[in-house]
Amino acid sequence: MKKISLGQSMIPIVVLIALLALNVYVFESDATYGSNQFSLLLAAAVAAIIGIRNGVKFEEILDRISLNLKATTPAILILLFVGSLAGTWLLSGIVPAMIYYGLNILTPTIFFVACILICIVVSMATGSSWTTSATIGIALIGIGNGLGLDSAMTAGAVLSGAYFGDKMSPLSDTTNLAPAIAGTDLNTHIKYMTITTVPTIIITLIVFLILGFTASIHGNIDKEIVQNLIADNFNVSPWLFTVPLLVIILIVMRVPPLMALLVGTVLGGVAAIIFQQDLLLQMSGAESLNSVETYRIVMNSITVDTIIPVEEVRLENGTLLNLGGLFEQGGMAGMLGTVWLIICAMAFGGVLEAIGALKRISEFFLGLFQSVFGLFASTVATALALNITASDQYLAIVVSGKMFSEAYKDKGLAPENLSRTLEDSATVTSVLVPWNTCGAYHSKVLLGEAGNMSFIPYAIFNYLSPFMTLLVAAIGYKIRMRGEEKESIFS
């Protein structure tokens, strides 16, 4: 097998970027419904041709793709369960109840800051940005819509808070993975991350506070209208909150997320039967509700969709207000487009890995700079490139960490420098790539059928984190060297 050149390694990436740009121009927000997926496969085919010409066997490429797809199995299952959970939580009135009571507490001026703080608490408790989006994130999007706020801004606030916890919680898989790859311990890693993470979240809160005072309200929606609409269609009760509370408790107790989401889905269906009998009767169209019809409605909410029939409301100025979007979820079927995108993205990343393109690109970044700051910059650039090409934050962490660990040793840098840089770049930026598993997941969960990346300008914590870690490296602030006392770095 002949070693692939840097130019050859970049050809599939250039092809992919060109095709994705064409898709955005032609299909706009509909690009995620198929054209992006096919573009990933076309770019993968280009990479495979280059690899075969360099002596890579086609069977080796298929084996690498298979391993990549196997690694995404938990993520795909989580996606399907999130779709099912969202459906039953809507049908049961859990999400509408969150919106109903949330409108009593939150106002547009403090809403975005409250979103961040609430998501920080949930993500720190669960260690998962995915769980945070799938539970409280969905409800906050609904509350924001009810207040007339831009859903893209709300999604950005949700993700900023969710990724703070995903990065800092000792329960997070990435927070455990990064120090394990770099060669440091969990507690040192978390403490060392505060140097960059705390300033970043403070800046994020300040920006969103300003946005809260300056953001325009779309449609001038009266929150009482939304609350009345919810009360007219759902039996709203504080008892409904026992279901999401139990799910969070299960995750904190380290119950596997798949099991916790399954329990949440089943309990959501049970809650629908207990609390929303009038709604189920209305949806069945029958005079009485029997067990077969109840099963059909609940199972449809899990697998296909949940569409609560709500009437348009006429405002005092004569405008018809349609809030049907607050009461629709796609169930497991609604997640299939995202699953399709992830499969195609992992196929693309698998081909690049099989032909040696990822390794060649990483070597280029490793040799780009010789200074300490250059090493940090190379790590960040490699992690970003892997998030784009390998389409998975775990691969970005593992590959970057393995590549640069010896370089950090050679520079006399303590391993927590590497683990922190991996988190500041690989973990938080994965959501900014549309075809990355995280980007595809969060855009679908938070923005529903729109499934677009309009939240990117407002995911402030996510794109500010890499710049913060580079700033700290550039000024040499508390860059700990090997053999230096750990305590001195935090004094």
Image: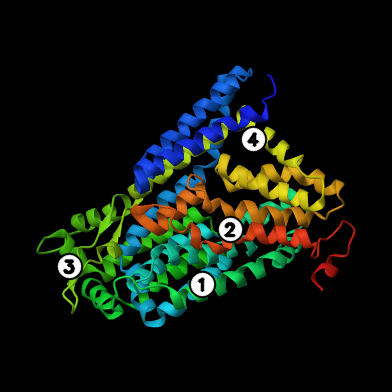
For disc 1, the neighbor class at 10 Å (few under 14, some 14 to 19, many from 20) is many
Residue 89: name its quadrant. bottom left
Which sits earlier in the primary sequence, circle 4 or circle 1? 1
Label 2 sits on a secondary structure element that is helix
For disc 2, the neighbor class at 10 Å (few under 14, some 14 to 19, many from 20) is many
Label 4 sits on a secondary structure element that is helix
Does residue 176 appear anywhere in the picture? yes
Q: Would residue 277 appear left or right of 404 to someone viewing this image?
A: left
Q: Would residue 237 appear left or right of 246 to someone viewing this image?
A: left
* Residue highlighted by disc 4: 358
The amino acid at mark 1 is Phe
* Residue highlighted by disc 3: 311
Name the front one of labels 4 and 1.
Answer: 1
* Residue highlighted by disc 1: 208
The amino acid at mark 4 is Leu
The amino acid at mark 2 is Tyr
